[in-house]
Structure formats: C-alpha cells, structure tokens
Image: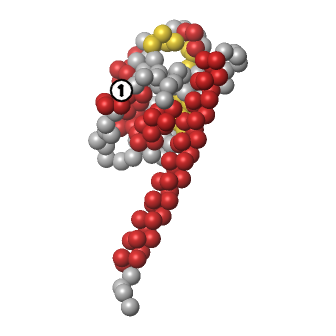
Amino acid sequence: SPLRPLLDFRELMSLRLQLACDLRLDDQVCADMAHAWCHMQYLGISTFRELVLDLPTLEGLIPFAIHCTQLVHLSLYVNARDFNEATMALPRRLERSPLTSLHVGDSPISRPDRVAAFLSRMFPHLRSISHWKSHEQSPEAEARDRDWNEVQRYISLFAEIREDERRWVELERDKEDKPSG
C-alpha cells in the first residue's frame, strides 16, 4: 500500500490524500492507520473509484473508534454491503469516539438501517454521513444514493433519540437529588 511509509509519522493530526494510483485499503491497513495515527483529527483518503481495488469493511472502522480519540472527520471508501453483524460487538474503550462526520464517496451499500445502527453504535457523536451523488443513471447508482441518504436520515434520528435520553436521565437525576417535601 502507498500508505505504509506514512505510518512512521506518528504525530499526524490531519491528512488528506488524493491518490492517482491503485488504492488497496483493507481492514488491516485501517487498523494499522488507527494504531499509528492515534492523534489524528481529520483523515481523508480518496482516489478515482475505478482505481479502488480493495475496500475495508465496516468492521475496518472499529480501530478508528477505539484508538483515534480525537478523530472528528473521516473520509474513506468502505464496503458497507453484506457485513456480518454477529462480529460487530461494541469495542472496549475508555471513551466514546468524537467522530461527527463521515464521508464515504460512492461506497457500495446494502441494508442501510443496519449500516446506520452499526455506525451509530461505533460513533455515537456522528451527525453527518455524506457520499458522492452518482452522475450515472443506472438503477444500481440510484439505489446507492437512496441507501446512503437513508443512512443519514437514520443517523439524524438516532442522534435526536440519544439527546432525548440524555435529557430524561438529567431530569431523573435532578428529581432524585431534590429532597422530598
């Protein structure tokens, strides 16, 4: 992978790469990046879609949730199709990932409700999922656009529900802290 030499730069906080070569990103490369760049706040890696040879799965995003405790924006192609939910247990970590923005290019996707649920669990502060709108007029491209838009709708809804739950917990704590009559 052309990214391997960059892993030596352990203090990177921001990196945006637009590659004009074949891109081989898999789950292991993502894990290596997350371990090497734990101070990363912004990470964007892209190329022309036809040059992407390997894609990380959604599971490949887990190391970013665990190790990159300052990462707020991630831009990365992923394979969000046919993932195995049985292996998607919540990772053990000391704090919640601060990621608020995820850009997925024109990544393949299926089952947008399950993709959104997974992303919301891994990245509880996630508010924005963006993708490239396809210029082609094929049924597959239209379905991909529709599915990523649906993921964004779910993410927004999950964020509202989380905020409501926080408010209820605060109200209940306040109620318990007040001495009765």
Q: Is residue 43 something that shows in the picture?
A: no
Q: Residues within 10 Å of mark 1 (few under 14, many from 20)?
A: few
Q: Residue at x 60, y 13 (%)?
A: 48
Q: Residue furthest bottom?
A: 181
* Quadrant holding the N terminus: top left
* Quadrant holding the C terminus: bottom left
The answer to whether 39 is drawn above or below residue 18 in the figure is below
Q: Secondary structure at mark 1?
A: loop
The residue where tag 1 is placed is 84
| x, y percent for residue 160 | 54, 53
- Name the foreground residue: 151 vs 107: 151
- Name the foreground residue: 40 vs 152: 152
Q: Residue furthest left?
A: 92
Q: Is residue 116 left or right of residue 7?
A: right
Q: Residue at x 41, y 75 (%)?
A: 174
Looking at numbered disc 1 in the image, what kind of residue is underneath it?
Asn
Q: Is residue 131 left or right of residue 179?
A: right
